[in-house]
Amino acid sequence: MLALIKNIKNLVGVESTPQLRKQGKEMSVLETIKDAYLVIEDGKIKAFGEMKTLAEQSFDREVDATGRMVFPTFCDSHTHLVYANSRELEFVDKIRGLSYEEIAKRGGGILNSAKATAAATEDELYEMARRRLEDVMRLGTGAIEIKSGYGLTTESELKLLRVIRRLKENSPVTIKSNFLGAHGIPLEYRGHQEDYVDLVINEMIPRVADEGLADFIDVFCDQGFFTVEDTARILEAGIRYGMKPKIHANEMAVSGGVQVGVKYGAISVDHLEQMGDAEIECLKGTETMPTILPGCAFFLNLPLSPARQMIDAGLPVAMASDYNPGTSPSNNMQLILSMACIRYRLTPEEAFNATTLNTAYAMGVSDILGSIAVGKKANFYITKPIPSYEYMPYAYGENKVERVFLNGVEI
Protein backbone atom coordinates (compact mmCIF):
# COMPACT_ATOMS: atom_id res chain seq x y z
CA MET A 1 0.00 0.00 0.00
CA LEU A 2 1.18 3.49 -0.92
CA ALA A 3 -0.01 6.23 1.44
CA LEU A 4 0.48 9.99 1.59
CA ILE A 5 0.36 12.35 4.56
CA LYS A 6 0.03 15.79 2.98
CA ASN A 7 -0.04 19.45 3.96
CA ILE A 8 1.92 18.81 7.14
CA LYS A 9 2.44 22.09 8.97
CA ASN A 10 5.84 20.91 10.21
CA LEU A 11 7.49 17.51 9.75
CA VAL A 12 9.80 17.16 12.75
CA GLY A 13 12.76 14.90 13.36
CA VAL A 14 13.74 14.24 9.75
CA GLU A 15 17.14 12.84 8.83
CA SER A 16 18.57 12.90 5.34
CA THR A 17 21.64 11.06 6.62
CA PRO A 18 20.47 8.85 9.49
CA GLN A 19 22.50 8.63 12.71
CA LEU A 20 22.33 5.88 15.29
CA ARG A 21 22.43 8.41 18.15
CA LYS A 22 23.18 12.05 18.89
CA GLN A 23 25.60 13.27 21.51
CA GLY A 24 26.85 16.55 22.93
CA LYS A 25 26.14 19.50 20.66
CA GLU A 26 24.52 17.20 18.08
CA MET A 27 21.56 16.84 20.42
CA SER A 28 20.57 20.46 19.78
CA VAL A 29 20.05 19.71 16.07
CA LEU A 30 16.45 18.89 15.12
CA GLU A 31 15.73 19.01 11.41
CA THR A 32 12.23 20.01 10.29
CA ILE A 33 10.39 20.63 7.02
CA LYS A 34 7.52 23.10 6.85
CA ASP A 35 4.53 22.53 4.56
CA ALA A 36 5.64 18.96 4.06
CA TYR A 37 4.53 15.57 2.82
CA LEU A 38 5.37 12.02 3.94
CA VAL A 39 5.04 8.95 1.73
CA ILE A 40 4.67 5.47 3.22
CA GLU A 41 4.96 2.17 1.39
CA ASP A 42 4.59 -1.30 2.90
CA GLY A 43 5.00 -0.03 6.45
CA LYS A 44 8.14 1.99 5.81
CA ILE A 45 8.98 5.60 5.02
CA LYS A 46 9.51 5.93 1.28
CA ALA A 47 9.95 9.68 0.84
CA PHE A 48 9.36 13.09 2.40
CA GLY A 49 9.89 16.71 1.49
CA GLU A 50 8.20 20.04 0.83
CA MET A 51 4.71 19.88 -0.68
CA LYS A 52 5.82 21.96 -3.67
CA THR A 53 8.25 19.18 -4.62
CA LEU A 54 5.70 16.34 -4.47
CA ALA A 55 5.43 14.70 -7.89
CA GLU A 56 2.00 13.94 -9.35
CA GLN A 57 1.09 10.31 -8.61
CA SER A 58 -1.75 8.19 -7.27
CA PHE A 59 -1.96 6.87 -3.72
CA ASP A 60 -4.02 4.14 -2.10
CA ARG A 61 -4.69 6.46 0.83
CA GLU A 62 -4.26 10.16 1.51
CA VAL A 63 -4.38 11.90 4.90
CA ASP A 64 -4.67 15.68 5.06
CA ALA A 65 -2.64 17.03 8.02
CA THR A 66 -3.41 20.71 7.46
CA GLY A 67 -2.58 22.73 10.58
CA ARG A 68 -0.99 19.71 12.27
CA MET A 69 2.53 18.49 12.83
CA VAL A 70 4.07 15.04 12.39
CA PHE A 71 6.70 13.58 14.72
CA PRO A 72 8.41 10.19 14.96
CA THR A 73 6.82 8.19 17.76
CA PHE A 74 8.51 8.10 21.13
CA CYS A 75 10.75 5.17 22.00
CA ASP A 76 10.48 4.24 25.67
CA SER A 77 13.62 2.30 26.50
CA HIS A 78 12.96 1.53 30.18
CA THR A 79 9.64 0.19 31.50
CA HIS A 80 8.26 -2.47 33.82
CA LEU A 81 4.88 -2.59 32.08
CA VAL A 82 3.95 -6.16 33.04
CA TYR A 83 2.86 -6.23 36.68
CA ALA A 84 -0.06 -7.47 38.72
CA ASN A 85 -0.95 -4.74 41.18
CA SER A 86 -0.74 -1.02 41.77
CA ARG A 87 1.03 0.23 44.91
CA GLU A 88 -0.83 3.35 45.96
CA LEU A 89 -0.66 2.41 49.65
CA GLU A 90 3.12 2.66 49.47
CA PHE A 91 2.61 6.04 47.84
CA VAL A 92 0.88 7.09 51.05
CA ASP A 93 3.78 5.65 53.08
CA LYS A 94 6.16 7.84 51.08
CA ILE A 95 4.01 10.90 51.81
CA ARG A 96 4.31 10.02 55.51
CA GLY A 97 8.07 10.01 55.26
CA LEU A 98 9.22 6.45 54.60
CA SER A 99 12.03 6.10 52.06
CA TYR A 100 12.04 3.67 49.15
CA GLU A 101 14.75 1.65 50.90
CA GLU A 102 12.74 1.50 54.15
CA ILE A 103 9.64 0.26 52.33
CA ALA A 104 11.71 -2.38 50.50
CA LYS A 105 13.35 -3.63 53.71
CA ARG A 106 9.99 -4.44 55.28
CA GLY A 107 8.82 -6.46 52.27
CA GLY A 108 7.22 -3.71 50.23
CA GLY A 109 8.34 -2.28 46.93
CA ILE A 110 9.51 -4.85 44.42
CA LEU A 111 8.71 -7.73 46.81
CA ASN A 112 5.11 -6.50 47.02
CA SER A 113 4.77 -6.73 43.24
CA ALA A 114 6.52 -10.11 43.20
CA LYS A 115 3.95 -11.54 45.59
CA ALA A 116 1.06 -10.32 43.44
CA THR A 117 2.75 -11.58 40.26
CA ALA A 118 3.15 -15.06 41.72
CA ALA A 119 -0.61 -15.14 42.45
CA ALA A 120 -1.66 -13.98 38.96
CA THR A 121 -2.05 -16.24 35.94
CA GLU A 122 -0.24 -15.60 32.70
CA ASP A 123 -3.54 -14.75 31.00
CA GLU A 124 -4.41 -12.24 33.72
CA LEU A 125 -1.02 -10.58 33.45
CA TYR A 126 -1.28 -10.48 29.67
CA GLU A 127 -4.70 -8.82 29.68
CA MET A 128 -3.59 -6.14 32.16
CA ALA A 129 -0.43 -5.48 30.16
CA ARG A 130 -2.29 -5.40 26.84
CA ARG A 131 -4.58 -2.63 28.11
CA ARG A 132 -1.62 -0.64 29.40
CA LEU A 133 0.14 -1.02 26.06
CA GLU A 134 -2.90 0.35 24.23
CA ASP A 135 -2.78 3.44 26.45
CA VAL A 136 0.94 3.83 25.72
CA MET A 137 0.31 3.74 21.96
CA ARG A 138 -2.42 6.37 22.11
CA LEU A 139 0.00 8.76 23.82
CA GLY A 140 2.45 8.48 20.94
CA THR A 141 4.88 5.70 21.90
CA GLY A 142 5.77 3.30 19.09
CA ALA A 143 8.60 1.26 20.64
CA ILE A 144 9.06 0.05 24.18
CA GLU A 145 11.41 -2.07 26.25
CA ILE A 146 9.68 -4.18 28.90
CA LYS A 147 11.52 -5.76 31.80
CA SER A 148 10.70 -8.73 33.96
CA GLY A 149 11.82 -8.46 37.57
CA TYR A 150 8.56 -8.76 39.48
CA GLY A 151 8.93 -12.53 39.65
CA LEU A 152 12.10 -13.22 41.66
CA THR A 153 11.50 -16.96 41.27
CA THR A 154 12.33 -18.94 38.17
CA GLU A 155 8.74 -19.76 37.28
CA SER A 156 7.42 -16.25 37.92
CA GLU A 157 10.21 -14.64 35.91
CA LEU A 158 9.51 -17.00 33.01
CA LYS A 159 5.81 -16.17 33.30
CA LEU A 160 6.52 -12.46 32.97
CA LEU A 161 8.81 -12.97 29.99
CA ARG A 162 6.24 -15.18 28.24
CA VAL A 163 3.70 -12.38 28.66
CA ILE A 164 6.16 -9.98 27.04
CA ARG A 165 6.61 -12.46 24.17
CA ARG A 166 2.83 -12.56 23.66
CA LEU A 167 2.73 -8.78 23.57
CA LYS A 168 5.46 -8.82 20.92
CA GLU A 169 3.46 -11.28 18.83
CA ASN A 170 0.14 -9.44 19.08
CA SER A 171 0.97 -5.72 19.15
CA PRO A 172 2.06 -3.31 16.40
CA VAL A 173 4.45 -1.68 18.89
CA THR A 174 8.12 -2.61 18.52
CA ILE A 175 8.94 -4.40 21.79
CA LYS A 176 12.25 -5.49 23.32
CA SER A 177 12.29 -7.85 26.31
CA ASN A 178 14.66 -7.56 29.25
CA PHE A 179 15.37 -10.26 31.84
CA LEU A 180 15.69 -8.54 35.23
CA GLY A 181 15.74 -11.46 37.62
CA ALA A 182 18.22 -9.43 39.70
CA HIS A 183 15.70 -6.69 40.46
CA GLY A 184 15.37 -7.30 44.20
CA ILE A 185 16.53 -9.73 46.85
CA PRO A 186 13.77 -12.05 48.13
CA LEU A 187 13.29 -12.01 51.88
CA GLU A 188 14.42 -15.62 52.24
CA TYR A 189 17.81 -14.70 50.72
CA ARG A 190 18.50 -11.69 52.93
CA GLY A 191 21.92 -12.09 54.55
CA HIS A 192 23.11 -14.57 51.91
CA GLN A 193 22.15 -12.94 48.62
CA GLU A 194 25.02 -14.69 46.85
CA ASP A 195 22.78 -17.78 46.86
CA TYR A 196 20.09 -15.84 45.00
CA VAL A 197 22.72 -14.64 42.52
CA ASP A 198 23.64 -18.30 42.01
CA LEU A 199 19.97 -19.07 41.32
CA VAL A 200 19.78 -16.31 38.71
CA ILE A 201 22.97 -17.52 37.02
CA ASN A 202 22.59 -21.28 37.20
CA GLU A 203 18.85 -21.74 36.80
CA MET A 204 17.06 -18.64 35.55
CA ILE A 205 19.40 -17.51 32.78
CA PRO A 206 19.67 -20.95 31.10
CA ARG A 207 15.87 -21.36 31.18
CA VAL A 208 15.29 -17.87 29.78
CA ALA A 209 17.83 -18.48 27.03
CA ASP A 210 16.43 -21.91 26.21
CA GLU A 211 13.04 -20.36 25.41
CA GLY A 212 14.57 -17.32 23.68
CA LEU A 213 12.65 -14.97 25.95
CA ALA A 214 15.05 -12.03 26.45
CA ASP A 215 16.90 -9.55 24.27
CA PHE A 216 18.68 -7.97 27.24
CA ILE A 217 19.87 -8.85 30.73
CA ASP A 218 19.67 -6.28 33.51
CA VAL A 219 20.76 -5.90 37.15
CA PHE A 220 19.72 -3.43 39.86
CA CYS A 221 23.27 -2.49 40.89
CA ASP A 222 22.75 -0.11 43.78
CA GLN A 223 22.95 0.43 47.51
CA GLY A 224 20.78 -2.10 49.29
CA PHE A 225 20.39 -4.26 46.19
CA PHE A 226 23.10 -5.99 44.10
CA THR A 227 26.80 -5.29 44.44
CA VAL A 228 29.27 -4.62 41.64
CA GLU A 229 30.58 -8.17 42.13
CA ASP A 230 27.07 -9.65 41.92
CA THR A 231 26.41 -7.58 38.82
CA ALA A 232 29.59 -8.67 37.06
CA ARG A 233 28.81 -12.34 37.65
CA ILE A 234 25.25 -12.00 36.32
CA LEU A 235 26.25 -9.97 33.27
CA GLU A 236 29.01 -12.43 32.37
CA ALA A 237 26.50 -15.28 32.50
CA GLY A 238 23.93 -13.38 30.42
CA ILE A 239 26.52 -12.48 27.80
CA ARG A 240 27.47 -16.16 27.45
CA TYR A 241 23.84 -16.83 26.54
CA GLY A 242 23.65 -14.00 24.00
CA MET A 243 21.86 -11.36 26.09
CA LYS A 244 23.04 -7.76 25.74
CA PRO A 245 23.68 -6.07 29.13
CA LYS A 246 21.80 -3.14 30.62
CA ILE A 247 22.14 -1.73 34.14
CA HIS A 248 19.97 -0.05 36.77
CA ALA A 249 22.70 2.17 38.22
CA ASN A 250 23.21 4.94 40.77
CA GLU A 251 19.62 5.56 41.80
CA MET A 252 20.25 5.43 45.55
CA ALA A 253 24.01 6.02 45.68
CA VAL A 254 27.18 6.17 43.59
CA SER A 255 27.26 2.39 43.34
CA GLY A 256 29.86 1.56 40.70
CA GLY A 257 27.01 0.54 38.41
CA VAL A 258 28.08 2.91 35.64
CA GLN A 259 31.62 1.57 35.64
CA VAL A 260 30.60 -2.09 35.63
CA GLY A 261 28.08 -1.36 32.87
CA VAL A 262 30.74 0.25 30.69
CA LYS A 263 33.18 -2.58 31.43
CA TYR A 264 30.74 -5.17 30.12
CA GLY A 265 29.58 -3.14 27.12
CA ALA A 266 26.09 -2.34 28.39
CA ILE A 267 23.90 -0.76 25.74
CA SER A 268 22.62 1.60 28.43
CA VAL A 269 23.04 2.51 32.09
CA ASP A 270 19.77 3.79 33.53
CA HIS A 271 18.60 6.01 36.42
CA LEU A 272 21.81 7.96 37.20
CA GLU A 273 20.31 10.19 39.87
CA GLN A 274 23.67 9.97 41.66
CA MET A 275 26.46 10.94 39.26
CA GLY A 276 29.93 12.38 39.77
CA ASP A 277 32.73 13.51 37.49
CA ALA A 278 34.20 9.99 37.51
CA GLU A 279 30.99 8.50 36.10
CA ILE A 280 30.82 11.11 33.35
CA GLU A 281 34.45 10.53 32.42
CA CYS A 282 33.87 6.78 32.41
CA LEU A 283 31.08 7.14 29.84
CA LYS A 284 33.08 9.29 27.41
CA GLY A 285 34.08 7.52 24.22
CA THR A 286 31.94 4.46 24.94
CA GLU A 287 28.97 2.91 23.16
CA THR A 288 26.88 2.96 26.36
CA MET A 289 23.85 5.28 26.44
CA PRO A 290 23.29 7.14 29.73
CA THR A 291 19.53 6.99 30.30
CA ILE A 292 17.73 9.27 32.74
CA LEU A 293 14.32 8.43 34.22
CA PRO A 294 12.64 11.75 35.12
CA GLY A 295 9.40 10.15 36.32
CA CYS A 296 11.17 8.16 39.03
CA ALA A 297 13.13 11.16 40.33
CA PHE A 298 9.92 13.20 40.36
CA PHE A 299 7.84 10.55 42.14
CA LEU A 300 10.48 9.73 44.78
CA ASN A 301 11.82 13.29 45.16
CA LEU A 302 15.30 12.11 44.22
CA PRO A 303 18.19 14.34 43.12
CA LEU A 304 18.15 15.16 39.43
CA SER A 305 20.67 13.49 37.18
CA PRO A 306 23.09 16.12 35.79
CA ALA A 307 21.80 15.95 32.22
CA ARG A 308 23.06 19.40 31.30
CA GLN A 309 26.56 18.60 32.53
CA MET A 310 26.55 15.30 30.66
CA ILE A 311 25.53 16.86 27.35
CA ASP A 312 28.00 19.72 27.78
CA ALA A 313 30.69 17.08 28.35
CA GLY A 314 29.87 15.62 24.94
CA LEU A 315 27.81 12.64 26.07
CA PRO A 316 24.54 11.44 24.56
CA VAL A 317 21.52 11.41 26.87
CA ALA A 318 18.31 9.39 26.61
CA MET A 319 15.19 9.87 28.73
CA ALA A 320 12.63 7.11 29.36
CA SER A 321 9.55 6.69 31.53
CA ASP A 322 10.52 3.89 33.97
CA TYR A 323 6.79 3.07 33.90
CA ASN A 324 6.15 0.82 36.91
CA PRO A 325 3.68 0.55 39.80
CA GLY A 326 5.98 1.62 42.60
CA THR A 327 8.30 4.44 41.61
CA SER A 328 7.01 5.87 38.32
CA PRO A 329 3.33 5.04 37.67
CA SER A 330 3.07 7.03 34.43
CA ASN A 331 3.23 5.71 30.88
CA ASN A 332 3.22 9.18 29.28
CA MET A 333 6.34 9.99 27.26
CA GLN A 334 4.88 13.41 26.46
CA LEU A 335 5.28 14.15 30.16
CA ILE A 336 8.88 12.89 30.08
CA LEU A 337 9.52 15.26 27.17
CA SER A 338 8.21 18.15 29.27
CA MET A 339 10.21 17.13 32.33
CA ALA A 340 13.37 17.01 30.21
CA CYS A 341 12.93 20.72 29.51
CA ILE A 342 11.35 21.93 32.76
CA ARG A 343 13.42 20.03 35.34
CA TYR A 344 16.63 19.13 33.49
CA ARG A 345 16.95 22.32 31.41
CA LEU A 346 17.24 20.59 28.05
CA THR A 347 16.19 22.60 25.04
CA PRO A 348 13.15 21.26 23.16
CA GLU A 349 15.47 20.01 20.43
CA GLU A 350 17.64 18.11 22.90
CA ALA A 351 14.55 16.73 24.64
CA PHE A 352 13.10 15.38 21.39
CA ASN A 353 16.36 13.63 20.54
CA ALA A 354 16.56 12.25 24.10
CA THR A 355 13.08 10.65 23.85
CA THR A 356 13.21 9.38 20.26
CA LEU A 357 16.52 8.65 18.55
CA ASN A 358 18.62 8.17 21.67
CA THR A 359 16.03 5.98 23.39
CA ALA A 360 15.78 3.97 20.17
CA TYR A 361 19.56 3.50 20.42
CA ALA A 362 19.17 2.37 24.06
CA MET A 363 16.83 -0.36 22.75
CA GLY A 364 19.10 -1.30 19.87
CA VAL A 365 16.59 -0.16 17.22
CA SER A 366 17.82 3.27 16.11
CA ASP A 367 18.61 1.85 12.69
CA ILE A 368 14.87 1.39 12.09
CA LEU A 369 13.18 3.83 14.49
CA GLY A 370 13.61 7.15 16.29
CA SER A 371 13.46 9.59 13.38
CA ILE A 372 11.80 10.31 10.04
CA ALA A 373 14.20 8.76 7.54
CA VAL A 374 13.81 6.85 4.30
CA GLY A 375 13.74 3.10 4.93
CA LYS A 376 12.82 3.35 8.61
CA LYS A 377 9.56 2.01 10.01
CA ALA A 378 6.65 4.39 9.43
CA ASN A 379 6.03 4.99 13.14
CA PHE A 380 4.79 8.54 13.63
CA TYR A 381 2.00 10.57 15.16
CA ILE A 382 -0.04 13.50 13.93
CA THR A 383 -0.68 16.17 16.49
CA LYS A 384 -3.78 18.17 17.20
CA PRO A 385 -3.47 21.70 15.78
CA ILE A 386 -0.55 23.23 17.68
CA PRO A 387 1.40 26.45 17.05
CA SER A 388 4.99 25.11 17.13
CA TYR A 389 7.04 22.05 18.05
CA GLU A 390 8.11 23.86 21.21
CA TYR A 391 4.47 23.62 22.30
CA MET A 392 4.88 19.87 22.79
CA PRO A 393 7.05 20.11 25.94
CA TYR A 394 5.54 23.45 26.95
CA ALA A 395 1.94 22.23 27.37
CA TYR A 396 2.69 19.58 29.98
CA GLY A 397 -0.19 17.34 31.02
CA GLU A 398 -2.11 17.92 27.80
CA ASN A 399 -2.33 15.13 25.23
CA LYS A 400 -1.26 16.73 21.96
CA VAL A 401 -1.47 13.50 19.91
CA GLU A 402 -4.47 13.14 17.61
CA ARG A 403 -3.58 10.11 15.44
CA VAL A 404 -0.90 7.44 15.68
CA PHE A 405 0.54 5.33 12.85
CA LEU A 406 2.63 2.23 13.52
CA ASN A 407 4.24 0.29 10.69
CA GLY A 408 2.38 2.66 8.37
CA VAL A 409 -1.07 1.72 9.71
CA GLU A 410 -3.25 3.97 11.82
CA ILE A 411 -4.03 2.34 15.16
Image (spheres, helix red, strand yellow):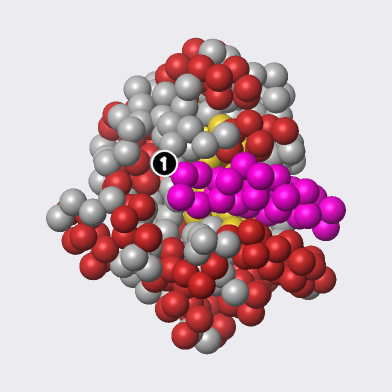
Say which residue appears at 69% left-offset and 68% top-offset.
199
Say which residue appears at 55% left-offset and 19% top-offset.
278
Q: Is residue 394 left or right of residue 29?
A: left
State whether residue 351 appears in this view: no
Q: Which residue is mark 1?
A: 252
Which of the two residues, 160 or 8, is positioned nearer the viewer here?
160
Q: Is residue 286 left or right of residue 114?
A: right
State whether residue 295 appears in this view: yes
Q: Quarter of the image holding residue 373?
A: top right
Residue 178: percent from left, percent from top: 64, 57
Residue 365: percent from left, percent from top: 69, 44
Which of the two residues, 36 or 332, is positioned nearer the viewer here?
332
Query: Which region is colored magenta?
Result: 216-245
Q: Secondary structure at mark 1?
A: loop
Tag 1: amino acid: Met
Taking 149 as reference, is 408 above or below it?
above
Taking 379 as reference, is 201 above or below it?
below
Taking 57 as reference, is 287 above or below it?
above
Which of the two residues, 252 or 171, is positioned nearer the viewer here?
252
Residue 200: percent from left, percent from top: 68, 64
Q: Is residue 381 magenta?
A: no
Say which residue appears at 43% left-offset and 68% top-offset.
111
Q: Quarter of the image holding residue 261?
A: top right
In the rendered image, the quadrant that contains the N terminus is bottom right
